[in-house]
Every structure is written in structure tokens, then in C-alpha cells.
Amino acid sequence: MIVYLDSSVLARAYLADEDGHEDAVTLLEDPEIAAVTGIWTRIEVSGALVRAARVGRIDAQRLLAMLDGDLSADGPVSTLAIAQEKVEESALRLVRQHALRAMDAWHLAVAQLTVPPLAEPGEQIGFASRDAGQAAVAERLGFVGV
């Protein structure tokens, strides 16, 4: 199964004091799941980690290094990119149809445009998010909630 990880899930893999931390770690470690995410996820998760460090919750340098390793070419999470204009067109449509926040729509647009062509015939595609609205739209788009 291929699962697109929204930044809300990936960030929790590094923030042990967050609800959903164990679930995020389990998802990353599952050998049956090919985890993917968009190229902007590194920026979003880095921001979350730096903000957590500023209030003394974590050691940012160590966790940023882990994030970079996880998103590297040989890491457990593959990063997906697609032409910006295609993502913007799709994300705009999702915002207007579903009243999503911009980055939630961006993640769904990237997932919708890139994940289905990666799947083998009959293989399920999943979308992992901590946001109920985003997850509901993902399911309407054909993704299985993870």
C-alpha cells in the first residue's frame, strides 16, 4: 500500500509528546507501507520542530537531522514533486469545493496527482492526516484513511 503522509502526521513521528506519536512512528516503520509526501513537507515539519525547540520541548538539531534522513533518497519516506501549475490548479479547486486550508489542499493535490500513477493495479492508496476535514476529502478522492 502506498500512503501519502500529510505533514501533520510526519511531524508527530518526531514529537514524542504529541497525540498520535506512536501511530506515526508505527506507520513509518511498517514494511508493508510505501510512505510518500510532497516536497513542501520538509519545510512544514522543520517549522514545527523549530517552534517546539523554542519552547524547550525538543532538541531541534537532532530531530531535523532525523527528518532530513527520513526524507533523503534512501530514507523511508519518498518525496514527490510535480509541476507547480498543476498543483496550484488542483489545490485551488479543492479549496473552493471543500473549504480546505491552503496547505491541506496543496497536500491533497500533490497526492491526487502523483500517487495513483505509482500504484500497482488493484493496490490501495492511503492518505494519513490528523485533520478530519482533510481526511474526509481524501476519502472522497479515493484514498483510504490511515
Image (cartoon, rainbow, N blue to C red):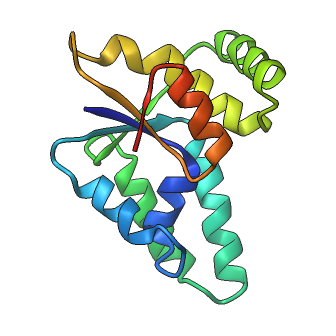
**Residue visible at 56% across and 76% down in the picture:** 60
Residue farthest along the left direction in this orientation? 31
129 in relation to 63, above or below? above
- Residue 101 lies in quadrant: top right
- Residue 95 lies in quadrant: top right
Is residue 83 left or right of 22 when viewed as pictured? right
Is residue 86 left or right of 81 when viewed as pictured? right
**Residue visible at 61% across and 29% down in the picture:** 137
Q: Nearer the viewer, residue 113 or 127?
A: 127
Residue 98 lies, in percent from the top left, at 76, 26
Q: Nearer the viewer, residue 6 or 47?
A: 6
Residue 142 lies, in percent from the top left, at 46, 20
Is residue 74 left or right of 52 when viewed as pictured? left
**Residue visible at 39% across and 15% down in the picture:** 116
**Residue visible at 40% across and 44% down in the picture:** 146
- Residue 50 lies in quadrant: bottom right
Residue 123 lies, in percent from the top left, at 23, 20
Q: Nearer the viewer, residue 127 or 43?
A: 127
Residue farthest along the bottom direction in this orientation? 56
Residue 47 lies, in percent from the top left, at 68, 60
Is residue 118 left or right of 137 when viewed as pictured? left
The N terminus is located in which quarter?
top left
